Image (cartoon, helix red, strand yellow):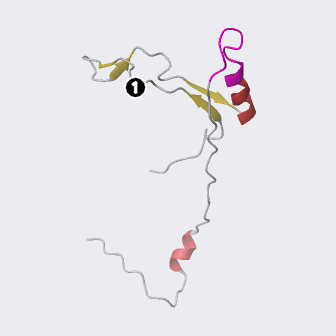
Amino acid sequence: MSSGKDQTRFWRIDFDVPEMAERWENQLIGWASSADPMQSLRLKFLNKEDAIQFAEKQGKHLAPSWNYYVQEPKSAHFKKKEYKTNFLYSPDKLRWIQTK
C-alpha cells in the first residue's frame, strides 16, 4: 500500500473538540457518536490567505473572530529511485536479505 499525495495541496480549518463533549457508543453499529456538529466539520481552502481571512471574518458583527493558529506544511523530500539501481555493481559488501 502506498500513501498518495493527491488532494493534499489544500489549506484546511479543523475545529477543536472540547474535552467535555458528550460522546456515546452507537449500540446498533458500535461507532462513537457525539452531539457536537463541529466534530467532523473540515473546511478546505486553496491558499493560506483565504483560510486566515475566513477565520478572521467569522463572528465579526456579533463576537470576536475565531482563535486560530497556522501550521506550516512539512517539506517533502523526494528521493528518485530507479529499478535498474538494484542490479548495479557495487564494490561494497553484498546485501544479504534473509526471507525466512
Q: Which residue is found at the position 62% from the left and 32% from the top?
A: 12
Residue 95 in picture, x, y percent from top left: 41, 81
Q: Which residue corresponds to mark 1?
A: 19
Vertical placement of 79 versus 95: above or below?
A: above
Q: Amino acid at mark 1?
A: Glu
Q: Which residues are magenta?
A: 55-66
Residue 64 in picture, x, y percent from top left: 66, 17
Q: Is residue 29 left or right of residue 38?
A: left
Q: Can residue 47 be seen by looking at this rendering?
A: no
- Of residues 100 and 19, the one nearer the viewer is 19
Number of on-image labels:
1
Vertical placement of 30 versus 72: above or below?
A: above
Tell me which corner region of the image, top left, top right, bottom left or bottom right, holds residue 61. Answer: top right
Q: Main secondary structure of the magenta part?
A: loop
Circle 1 residues within 10 Å: few <14, some 14–19, many ≥20? few
- Of residues 12 and 56, the one nearer the viewer is 56
Tell me which corner region of the image, top left, top right, bottom left or bottom right, holds residue 45. Answer: top right
Tell me which corner region of the image, top left, top right, bottom left or bottom right, holds residue 22. Answer: top left
64 drawn magenta: yes
Q: Which residue is found at the position 70% from the left and 29% from the top?
A: 52
Residue 46 in picture, x, y percent from top left: 71, 33
Q: Which residue is found at the position 39% from the left and 19% from the top?
A: 21
Residue 73 in picture, x, y percent from top left: 62, 46
The quadrant of the image that shows the C terminus is bottom left
Q: Can residue 20 be seen by looking at this rendering?
A: yes
Q: Is residue 79 left or right of residue 17?
A: right
Dot 1: element: loop
Q: Is residue 34 left or right of residue 38?
A: left
11 drawn magenta: no
- Of residues 33 and 16, the one nearer the viewer is 16
- Of residues 20 and 38, the one nearer the viewer is 20
